[in-house]
Amino acid sequence: MNPSFASCSDAELVLAVRRDRADAAFSVLYDRHTPRAFQTAWRILGGNEHEAEDVMQDAWVRAVDTLDTWRNGQAFGAWLRGITAHVAIDRLRRERRIVFESDVELPAPASPDVIDLETAIASLAPGYRVVLVMHDIEGFTHEEIAERLGITAGTSKGQLFKARRAVRVRLAANTAGGRND
Amino acid sequence: MTKNDDYRDDEWAPEEEAMFASLPRERIPSAELKARTTEAVRHHVGATTIERGLSRNTFILAAAACLIFIAGAAIGFAAARRMARSPDEPPATASNRAVARSDAPILILQPEGHVVWY
């Protein structure tokens, strides 16, 4: 981490990146906010490390390109996570992996082993997973999710309902499996 | 009961919420990603700067060309008006009589005697 920028606020770093295209300032900003945003991308993409890294790179490029839309006082990390989620969703949509229109058949758990919550979320259908991660973990409202996904708030609520049910099914199967052992 | 009420019944129980709260908030990507991202940002920003510079130069050139054209047209128009109003010069159009004279065949007129009637 560059010592001259290490103690700077996000606003100062953003200004340095915008005005001087300072690599050192970008480096500090990157180190400070990437781990949290990367976790978001990783979860939305179902735990695919490689895809999450591609999304993270694209998200930073888009963020730097639109730095003038970031307002001082707004949490930079939350702003970056919003962009990251958007890029991840774009990727899923482009590859037609998200289905919202109808009920999605719940895939059977990959293995009879005990799974944790993270694995249960990762195994959800993308349409469920995106809404669950954005609402229950990232704290987006249904209106915000609806806007980003191009669906109605009602559809977002419906997807969340089914996603929660699917997570419970997986975790319950877990418990039943544990009892059988 | 509405559909939204059904959805509300599906809130997480406190122990489930605790599970969500215990999920890791951060994940460290590979070290290679930082170098890759920095390079991508630098390349993209550089390309954007060049594009913006080009479009600005193109705009300035187009504006300058328009100004030169308008100035030239205005000067030409003003000069034409000044020439048309000049009082020293004869009118540019010939009279009908002058045209008739120039078109008529050349006649050698002989002096003739005049008859005076009383």
Image (cartoon, coloured by chain):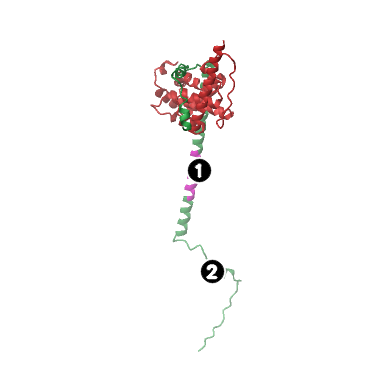
Magenta stretch: includes residue A105: no
Give the x, y percent position of residue A12.
40, 23
Element on which disc 2 rests: helix
Residue at the far front in the pictured view: B1
Q: Residue at x 45, y 27 (%)?
A: B8
Q: Chain of mark 2?
A: B
Mark 1 vs mark 2: in front: 1
Question: Which residue is identified by label 1?
Answer: B65
Q: Residues within 10 Å of mark 2 (few under 14, many from 20)?
A: few
Residue toward you, B32 or B23: B23
- B60 drawn magenta: yes
**Chain in red on the image:** A
The percent position of residue A91, horizontal first and vertical second, equals 56, 27
**Residue segment shown in magenta:** B59-73
Q: Is disc 1 surrounded by few (<14), some (14 to 19) or many (20+) residues within 10 Å?
A: few
Residue at the outermost bottom position: B118
Q: Secondary structure at mark 1?
A: helix
Question: Which quadrant of the rendered structure holds the N terminus of chain A?
Answer: top left
Residue A165, numbered label = none
